[in-house]
Amino acid sequence: MDWQGQKLAEQWLQILLLAFAAAAFATGYALGSFETMVLTYVSGVIITTLITVPNWPFFNRRPLKWLDPIEAEKHPKPQQIAANRTKNLSVVEVALDFAF
Amino acid sequence: MHSFGYRANALLTFALTILALICAMASFSDNLNSPSPSAHVQVLNINWFQKSSQGNDEVSLTLNVSANLQSLFTWNTKQVFVFLAAEYETPINSLNQVSLWDGIIPAKEYAQFGIHTTNKYHFDDQASLSSRNAGSNLRGREYNLTLHWHVMPKTGKMFADKLVMSGFRFPEEYR
């Protein structure tokens, strides 16, 4: 999920939950049924979960664009590799000396 | 909000906070209800009235209790506990209270009732050690029959109230 997607998900989460809570309280009070209120709210929470928790494609419309790693390619570090090679060679020479 | 777990956690905590809020609002809405309960109690007969083996006055009554408590029920009411108490004043204690009958009303449909019953619990004037004549206070004593109730909500505050029915008197002699 990109930055804009995260902001979008949080806004939707808050708006949807508050709206479902208001609707649940209104219907529960109007019908005089506590059970209706709780059931309406729980179904609202489930719908909100399905909308805001999974990583849907519409939360990934503005992906972050990083700069290409041009600088690193321009300046490789060949010196260190060369030094290692000479070191390895001398080790082999020492080993050969022992063998003969 | 960057991962599945963080979003699920944010949703759960916010959802439960709002749930607590709407429950508090439901409890608050009970204050908007102004109940008008009615009750009527008749003492049909004094079955017996005597000194028990412990020396306390003991009485058995046949009662007719009728009440309409439907207006106590709101959308946030789980049940109503109701009990009938005999209340009288003695020289030592300003209030003596003896429960005679009780019941649980589970729904509004059952809140209008008429019950014909003897007292469910023993009615005796319990002696206290501090006085000689305690335990034999009932002869000729005036008493109230009071219907108490406790409204138990689904969420929030419990309400209690009562209706006092006065003007009852025990006979002067045992029978």
Image: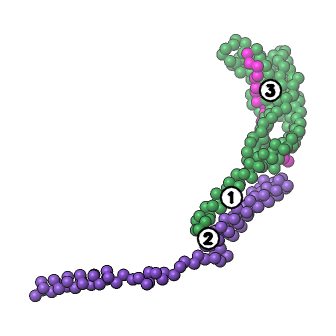
Chain colours: A purple, B green
Q: Is residue A15 above or below residue A80?
A: above
Question: Which residue does the numbered mark 3 point to in the structure image?
Answer: B86
Neighbour class for label 3 at 10 Å: few (<14), some, many (≥20)?
many
Element assignment for label 1: helix
Q: Earlier in the sequence, mark 1 or mark 3?
A: 1
- Residue B73, given in percent of the width and then of the height, sits at 83, 45
- Residue B79, given in percent of the width and then of the height, sits at 77, 45
Chain letter belonging to callout 2: A
Residue closest to the far left: A100
- Magenta range is B92-109
Question: Which residue does the numbered mark 2 point to in the structure image?
Answer: A3
Residue A54 in view, yes or no: no
In the rendered structure, the answer to whether residue B142 lies left or right of residue B9 reads: right
Q: Are marks 2 and 1 in contact (CB under 8 Å)?
A: no
Question: Which residue does the numbered mark 1 point to in the structure image?
Answer: B15
Q: Residue at (48%, 83%) from the top-left corner?
A: A70
The residues tagged by marks 1 and 3 sit, at their Cα atoms, a distance apart of 48 Å
